[in-house]
Amino acid sequence: MCQINRVCSSYNTIGEVDFFQWGDRMKKGKKPFLTLFHLLALILMGIYLTTGLIQSNFATNSRKANVIITINKDGSYSYKGDLLGGGLLYPARVEEAEKGIGGIIGVIRIHNQYNNMRVENLGVGLDKGKFTVNNEYPLDLVYESFLRDVRLKIEKGRLFTFDKTLVDYASIGHLIKGYELAGKDRFTIKKGATVDLKYILYMDLEAGNELQSVTAQMPIYINVHERCIIDDGEDHGNGGYDDNGRGHMPKDEETTEVEITEEPVPLDQPHWAHDCIISLLNHGVITGYPHEEYTIEDYFSGAVDPVTYVNEAVLPDSLVTRAETAVLIARALGLKEEYAATIGYKDYIPNWARGYVIATTRANIFEGYPSGLFKANNYITREEMIAVLSRAFNISLKDKSLELPFEDKDQIGNWALEYVKAGYESKVIEGYPDNTYKPKNNISRGETFTIICKLMGLHEEHTQFPEQANRDK
């Protein structure tokens, strides 16, 4: 801080002297003006950098990472450490936790040796079976309290200054199945790069005595999918692999990620896919994400309005990953989780999806990629989804001469064309009001649920909302 004061004093002196001699110096030319300009620029740069160093005091003193995630050259993951890391966590105010009083502060270091990867979702793991409770409270009570009262903040920055909040003290219950980052917070880790994230674990002051003398393991998961950044500097999506994992698509058919641009439905109004979602909730195919206030039990007991639960817990406008697709298909078909020491894929499969990925793989619904990867957290496009659902529900094209009416049918990959035709022939898909199919768009949860609803024969159980009439189903 003393350095800043001396720099500022020097700046004031220079400014005063040059102000009174301005007229004389102008006669001698512009060189003194340029010198003054350069000095001011250097002084301001010094102030900025010094302030940045003060703000980044935590980072510069915390070069050792608490958690190290490595994306290996073959696309598999390796992992060291966990968020708790033996630290002491107890109820505290946020401002105290951020100073390390009662909170746990650390660094998550991500090494990427594989390919350009896009981070769009963060999550935590919490194995209830590895919870150790050294008090008189039952395990279930302690576990639920931990999910509710322990919160996590994650920040990202540049040059060791963590000034961008990615996750703002979300509960562990909210994070345990994944936390989708806002569009502006998503970031790419280029091949060969390392990214550090700062995290703070905080326990709410309202936490009860049941969280005393508890130990647990809590890894952090980064949910990523490949980004194909080529010489033109543009981002060209997921690297050109098709969802059925049967080979690399030709260059003119590379999959390009296209975000869904439709306006989200207001939370107090029924979503266009509401009825299909209710049918799938009632049949146990979907349950919704962990929510701060509502559980699936609240939905079934009537403690929460169905519209509210669908919009806030099911999140129908969010996108769908390969892991989520495996779970949805397995539940829809009644497949049981299967377990194996080796799964056949070299990359990480989240624990909550692992049994279903094995089941759908053994049922020949998923096959993985030629490299031996499953890529659980890659988003699925519309043409990819109809391919796996066609295999799952045994939909085949009967009329080989069928012509699709979509204006963008030429954008459908050759590998997917027959699946899309079969879906259209069976009236499982209909396309958008502008007579397009948008095969390369990532598919939303609402669109996926509606297709599964029709394939399961549940669509007739309910009456469509008027706004559903022209939507893809």
Image: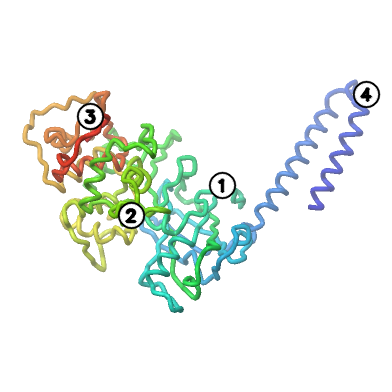
Mark toward the viewer: 4 or 2:
2
Image quadrant where residue 20 sits:
top right
- Front residue of 3/472: it is 472
The kind of residue on which mark 4 rests is Asp
Amino acid type of the residue that numbered disc 2 sits on in the rendered structure: Asp
Indicate which label's residue lies in the foreground, 3 or 1: 3
Label placed on residue 164: 1
Is 5 located above or below residue 200 in the figure?
A: above
Q: Residue at x 30, y 51 (%)?
A: 302
- Left or right, 381 with respect to 137, comes to left
Label 3 residue SS = loop
Please state, as top left, top right, bottom left or bottom right, where the C terminus lies in the image. top left
* C-alpha distance separating marks 4 and 1: 48 Å
Label 4, secondary structure: give it. helix
Which quadrant of the view contains residue 76?
Answer: bottom left
Question: Which marked residue is nearer to the observer: mark 3 or mark 4?
Answer: 3
Which numbered marker is on residue 199?
none
What residue is shown with label 2? 298
Q: Which mark is residue 469?
A: 3
Mark 4 = which residue?
A: 24
Whichever of labels 2 and 3 marks the residue nearer the N terminus, that label is: 2
Which numbered disc flags the more N-terminal residue, 3 or 4? 4
Decide: marks 3, 4 in contact (CB < 8 A)? Answer: no
Dot 1, crowdedness within 10 Å: few (<14), some or many (≥20)?
A: some
Q: Position of residue 324 (x, y in %)?
A: 29, 51
